[in-house]
Image (spheres, helix red, strand yellow):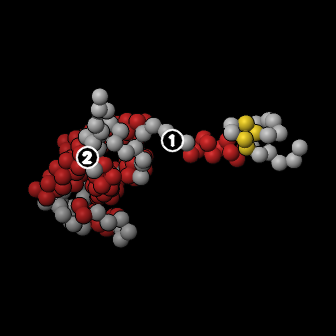
Amino acid sequence: VGRRVRLGKRWRGGGRRPPGRAGGTFWFRPVSARPLGAFRLIRGVVALTQLGMLAIDLDYWLTDRGILMGTEAAELAGPWRFSPLQYVQDPASVRAFVAGTVVVAALFTLAWRARFMGALLSFGMLAFHLRNIPTNCVPDTLLLHLLVYLILRPCRAAYSLHARPPSP
């Protein structure tokens, strides 16, 4: 009887495929990119919602008029947690940073240059996260981790501006 040799789709010697071959089929077969595209859409909407809720008390949380004044945010974060918002504290600059992050979040949600926009959105959300050390919690950290994951996702043009309907 001896070794099993593949002949077409059957195996000589009877029985099933060896376990290593079945696992390879599971992990490496082509799959649809739509679930990851839908996940990107949902995460983009959550990022826009989070930025909208942050915009309500923007001066209190992110400027020099609020809870952390002067260099307190940088001292609290320490040298390894850099955020540009620790050094830019006037309300106009912070509002411009928030507006830029909202535009990036909208473009990420629509999947225009999705990987690049995902990297920019991760940087922007991380800047808010590191400026506001006292308010960090598990949902904020989870959302940041999901953003970093979405930079690397292979969802191509699923549910995006680049997706074209099939030609007739």
Of badges 1 and 2, the one in the foreground is 1
| Camera sees residue 149 | yes
Instruction: Name the amino acid type tagged 2.
Output: Trp
Does residue 65 appear left or right of residue 25 in this picture? left
Count numbered badges in the picture: 2
Q: Which residue in the protein does label 2 denote?
A: 112
Image quarter of the N terminus? top right
Q: Which residue in the protein does label 1 denote?
A: 30
Q: Quadrant of residue 162?
A: top left
Please rate how many residues cluster around mark 1, counting C-alpha atoms within 10 Å: few if below 14, some from 14 to 19, many from 20: few
Image quarter of the C terminus? top left
Residue 5 percent across, percent down from the top left: 77, 46
Taking the view exactly as shown, the residue that stands out farthest to the bottom is 79
Separation of marks 1 and 2 at Cα, in angstroms: 24 Å
Residue 133 percent across, percent down from the top left: 34, 56
Taking the view exactly as shown, the residue that stands out farthest to the front is 7
Rendered residue at 17%/61% (across/down): 89
Question: Is disc 2 placed on a helix, strand or loop?
Answer: loop
Rendered residue at 38%/52% (across/down): 151
Please rate how many residues cluster around mark 2, counting C-alpha atoms within 10 Å: few if below 14, some from 14 to 19, many from 20: some
**Residue nearest the observer in this picture, 14 or 117:** 14
Rendered residue at 87%/47% (across/down): 2
Instruction: Name the amino acid type tagged 1.
Output: Pro
Q: Earlier in the sequence, mark 1 or mark 2?
A: 1
Does residue 117 appear left or right of residue 144 in this picture? left
